[in-house]
Amino acid sequence: MKTAVVYYSLDGNCAFVAEEVKSLFNAELIRLQTKDEKKRRGFAKYFWGGGMVFAHKKPPLKPYAFDPAAYELIVIGAPVWAGSPAPPIQTFLSESGMSGKKIALFVCHGGGKGNALGTLKNLLAGNEIIAEADFVNARKNSAEVKRQIADWVKGLQGK
Ligand SMILES: Cc1cc2nc3c(=O)[nH]c(=O)nc-3n(C[C@H](O)[C@H](O)[C@H](O)COP(=O)(O)O)c2cc1C
């Protein structure tokens, strides 16, 4: 099954999960970045990210190559910001033009996933969501999360 993993990751947790899915699935990785991506720490990071969520902003992305028609399965991964999928993923979904695709969703968070998966599903209306998962502090809990990812991917194969 030709698979793409499209994800955004500011602090590396979704990147960790995406890499792991890629290695188990032989998928193609597409990492999204915002045009103004730069290292932000502490308060500045929460102010920037949370501010975009509350203002319903969709930050412009750096150019990326993605043709949904090329894949049978598309895995989409997003960090949870203020209980929502991080806005860069919302930019991607608003411009991807996906419809009728098989999609598996994952979110990474620190213990409060809010309605991030529900919001993603709403934004992906018209597609078939075949699986969803959430991973808590993926890099810190890497051994446990690797096991969870392996189980998740096993369930995805053949769907
Ligand atoms: C702006 C911002 C808002 C966040 N809001 C939440 C939240 O509502 N709930 C939660 O559990 N974690 C929250 N976090 C933590 C991230 O979801 C968590 O660190 C996640 O693993 C980040 O993924 P990444 O490392 O791929 O960027 C937030 C982080 C940032 C930067």
Image (cartoon, grey):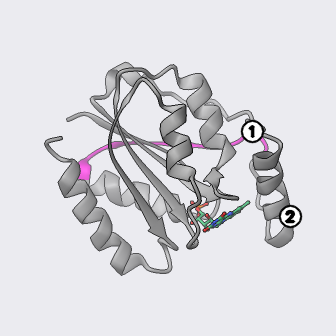
Q: Is residue 34 magenta?
A: yes
Identify the magenta region.
25-36
Crowding around mark 1 (Cα neighbors within 10 Å: few <14, some 14 to 19, many 20+) is few
Question: x, y (%) of residue 3?
Answer: 30, 37
Point 56% across, 51% down: residue: 116
Question: In the image, is residue 101 part of the stretch drawn in magenta?
Answer: no
Left or right: 111, with 6 as reference point: right
Q: Earlier in the sequence, mark 1 or mark 2?
A: 1
Which quadrant of the figure shows ligand 1? bottom right
* In-front residue for pair 125/87: 125
The residue sitting at 78% across, 56% down in the picture is 50
Give left or right: position of 103 versus 152.
Answer: right
Q: Position of residue 46 (x, y in %)?
A: 79, 63
**159 and 122: which is toward the camera:** 122
Q: Secondary structure at mark 2?
A: helix
Q: Nearer the viewer, mark 1 or mark 2?
A: 2
What numbered label is drawn on residue 35? 1
Q: Which residue is mark 2?
A: 44
Three-letter amino acid code at the position of disc 1:
Lys
Instruction: Find residue 8 and report its horizontal and vertical position in percent.
Output: 57, 48
Mark 1 sits near ligand 1, with its Cβ under 8 Å away: no
Disc 2 marks a residue whose amino acid type is Ala
Foreground pick, 130 / 74: 130
What percent of the width, then of the height, locates residue 113?
56, 62
Q: Is 53 rendered above or below residue 10?
A: above
